Image (cartoon, grey):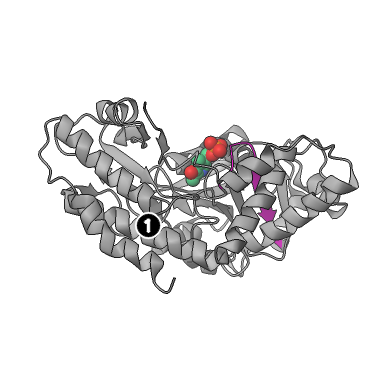
Amino acid sequence: MLKRYLLAPGPTPVPPEALLAMAAPIIHHRTPEFSAIFRRVADRSRVLFGTEQPVMMLASTGTGGMEAAVTNTLCKGDRVIVVEGGKFGERWSEICEVYGLQVTRIEVEWGTAVDPAAVASALEQHADARAILMQGSETSTTVLHPVAEIGRLIKDSDCLLIVDGITSVGVVDMPMDRSCIDVLVTGSQKAIMLPPGLALVSLSEKAWKANERSDLPRYYFDLAKERKNLEKDTSAYTPAVSLITGLDAVYDVIEKSGGLPEVYRRHLILAEAARTGALAIGLRLLAPDSPSPAATGVWLPEGIDGGAFTKLVRNTFGVELAGGQGHLKGKIVRIGHIGYADTFDVVVALTVIEMALTKMGHRVTPGAGAGAAQEVLLRLYDGS
Ligand SMILES: *Cc1c(COP(=O)(O)O)cnc(C)c1O
């Protein structure tokens, strides 16, 4: 028997309440019954996003939401500034280039957060920039970027702040309106604790104004059309019925377990525990200075091949951790502690890292990681 543990930073495990809700027979989407669910989920999503604006739901993965963010707010030939500090930052540049935008990259060393001063200076050099595109949390490098500080830079200008919040929405307290985010995107298979296939997108008033001017081609991903339909408690095309029903159940789960403040607190504690444990194993952190609460990246010891390591962890121990992407491939391992994750997920991750290292001939002290993490993890139960 090999019991499976999904401890990657996406897709993530789904709570049983949501699995059960999604197992219900499909109901037709143009019915009062579904409209009521659709409306409730859309309203609850505004709370999750921290916005007064409507949150649109698209049947796509997060990348579709990223593409919609670009095509609905920008014009052919526009200059944009992209924060590129990992695989997903590069994705912003790729999308923008496909649509003929002029991309100015701020190259950030992988494993570090962008310096707001670098963004300020890029804005000075490119006064024509129409948007800054960045990640809230760059999952490939397990870095948290200072979104609100960038928000303050563009607050009183026409420049939009477009944020991929796929591993920050529902992870860190980064409310869209107060952080001056103009377009915020997330996807269902990360902190939202659902299967892949749903993207959520919201636009600020400033972004809706830009939407009126925007001339990039779009058909399915037409957010103005979605907003109009959302006002009538429906969507332009067939919505992802089961995922939306599942999202309603997820919001119940969050509410019953202390609400969003508790969600943010849990992520911070799990991340701190993962880092404390990794250091106790003797591993170096990939992002020591600005770590993401969604996932923790660690450098593998010299001589340990990352590909063989994650394969051993998966095939022998049944645990899914994530390896590195781009030039980090083979060199790091990432522990996901996002969404439906708790104490014992972190304990499993740290322990399997020790056991796999041991099996690969690297000497570690058994239990060092989970042992060191315990004190941090106990804080989760303070007051309960
Ligand atoms: C997972 C992820 C994506 C990609 O989302 P898909 O759902 O695979 O399209 C984009 N950005 C970040 C930060 C992610 O973590």
Between 134 and 302, which is closer to the camera in this rendering?
A: 302
Between 351 and 177, which is closer to the camera in this rendering?
A: 351
Q: Is residue 80 above or below residue 2?
A: below
Between 1 and 140, which is closer to the camera in this rendering?
A: 1
Name the residue carrying label 1. Answer: 270
300 is within the stretch colored magenta: no
Q: Is residue 246 left or right of residue 346?
A: right
Q: Is residue 345 above or below residue 2?
A: below
Q: Position of residue 30 (x, y in %)?
A: 88, 41
The answer, for residue 130, to whether it is visible in the render is: yes
Q: Is residue 122 left or right of residue 21?
A: left
199 is within the stretch colored magenta: yes
Q: Which residues are magenta?
A: 193-204
The answer, for residue 76, to whether it is visible in the render is: no
Q: Position of residue 265 (x, y in %)?
A: 45, 65
Q: Position of residue 228 (x, y in %)?
A: 85, 50
Marker count (numbered) = 1
Q: Amino acid at mark 1?
A: Leu
Between 226 and 224, which is closer to the camera in this rendering?
A: 226
Mark 1, secondary structure of its residue: helix
Q: Is residue 247 left or right of residue 120?
A: right
Q: Residue furthest bottom?
A: 383
- Mark 1 surroundings: few (<14), some (14-19) or many (≥20) residues within 10 A: many
Residue shown at 59%/70% (left/top)?
A: 178
Q: From the image, which quarter does the C terminus lie in?
A: bottom left
Q: Residue furthest front?
A: 1
Q: Position of residue 116 (x, y in %)?
A: 42, 63
Q: From the image, which quarter does the N terminus lie in?
A: top left
Q: Mark 1 CB in 8 Å range of ligand 1?
A: no
Instruction: Tell me the quarter of the picture where residue 302 sits.
Output: top left
